[in-house]
Image (cartoon, helix red, strand yellow):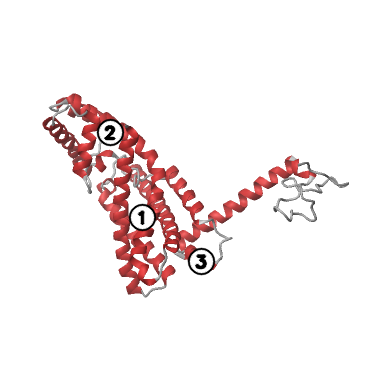
Amino acid sequence: MQETAGLSGQATACANCGTPLGGEYCARCGERRLHPDEHTLRHIVGEWFEAFSHGEGRLLVSLRTLLLKPGELTREYFRGRRMPYARPVALFFAVNLLYFLLTSLNTFSTVLETQMSVTPLEHAKQTMVLDKALGPRVSATVKAEVMADYWALYGSERAAVAAGRAASAAEQKADKEKGVAASRHPAALEAVYRYQERFDERTETLSRALVVALVPMLACFLWLTLAPLRRGLPELLIFATHLWSGLLLILLLFGWLVTGATLATRWFLDGRVPAILQNDTYASMALAVLVAIYVYRALRAYLHYPRVGCAILCTWMLAGLFWSLQLYRLLLFYVTVQVLH
């Protein structure tokens, strides 16, 4: 269909369906009337600025509400006040992008040595890694000895960190090469470390996509808990999306705080870092407290339950977050292994 224009140069027929235009928008398909000045550079730049400032404003309001008023976004969503805020899924992906671009924590892209050392199914994961790295022809005895040497090197590295004697990257590499050379099966242990490098590189990329699986995991967990109270799965899915968006923001800010504290102590202590900043246990405890406070406040704002009821539900939900993370790590491990081969 061809567009027609009047004396003013404006379109008189819809450019999309050809229907005669009686106003600014087509009554049949909703297409906007085309104006002659819309092809100018000034108009195009103005549209870019308007779209950017409007979208940025909604995102900033949503981020501020997530941090300062947990649970409020979900209440606003079901009240019907949605225009001032970013959509739940768009907000989650925006925060997810910010987290993986700017974070200093390694919360989701779990490295291979951690995957093989934590439950569940740590022995099955170790067996799978050895089969992939060494092949099926290597005997079970050799694989067991290789894994024993691997954990011996890993244990010495962790002991040095716990004692406040963390080595530089070059020193760690030299120590690892010495340990591999002194092992009972140097070639096999080296093959495991090569597989580990490939695994860690690939799992970091995959974690950015698979982290979205945490949202339905949490929503299903809450639904099994709150279904008798007539809380539907779609409603809980929105709440889980907002909650994980907020938790990702907390992880991002907490990582910056730990990194800043580490850099500051290095500057004040001539390059030395206190053991409290090298040991993950203390940081994990502080982060767990922050997460517990955030989850409790979100539940109070969203459900309006009494304090005692929200405290009980918060404890139960923290357990759900823990097990969903464990299930996520298990999923990430098997997906990474399958992608590598």
Along the polypeptide, which appears first: circle 3 or circle 1?
3
Which label sits on residue 217? 1
The residue carrying mark 3 is: 78
Residue 19 in the image, given as x and y percentages of width and height: 77, 50
Question: Which quarter shows the N terminus?
Answer: top right
Q: Measured along the vertical axis of the image, is residue 160 above or below residue 323?
A: above
* Front in this rendered view, residue 278 or 83: 83
Secondary structure category for the residue under label 3? helix
Taking the spot 75% from the left edge, 41% from the top edge, the residue there is 39
Residue density around tag 3, few if under 14, some if 14–19, many if 20 or more, within 10 Å: few
Compared across the picture, whether 90 is left or right of 310 comes to right
Secondary structure category for the residue under label 2? helix
Compared across the picture, whether 233 is left or right of 126 comes to right
Residue 301 in the image, given as x and y percentages of width and height: 43, 69
Mark 3 to mark 2 CA distance (whole Å): 46 Å
* Front in this rendered view, residue 269 or 132: 132
Along the polypeptide, which appears first: circle 3 or circle 2?
3
Q: Please, what is the three-letter code of the amino acid marked with disc 3?
A: Phe
Residue density around tag 1, few if under 14, some if 14–19, many if 20 or more, within 10 Å: many
Mark 2 to mark 1 CA distance (whole Å): 28 Å
Residue 297 in the image, given as x and y percentages of width and height: 40, 66
Which label sits on residue 188? none
Taking the spot 34% from the left edge, 60% from the top edge, the residue there is 221
* Front in this rendered view, residue 160 or 102: 102
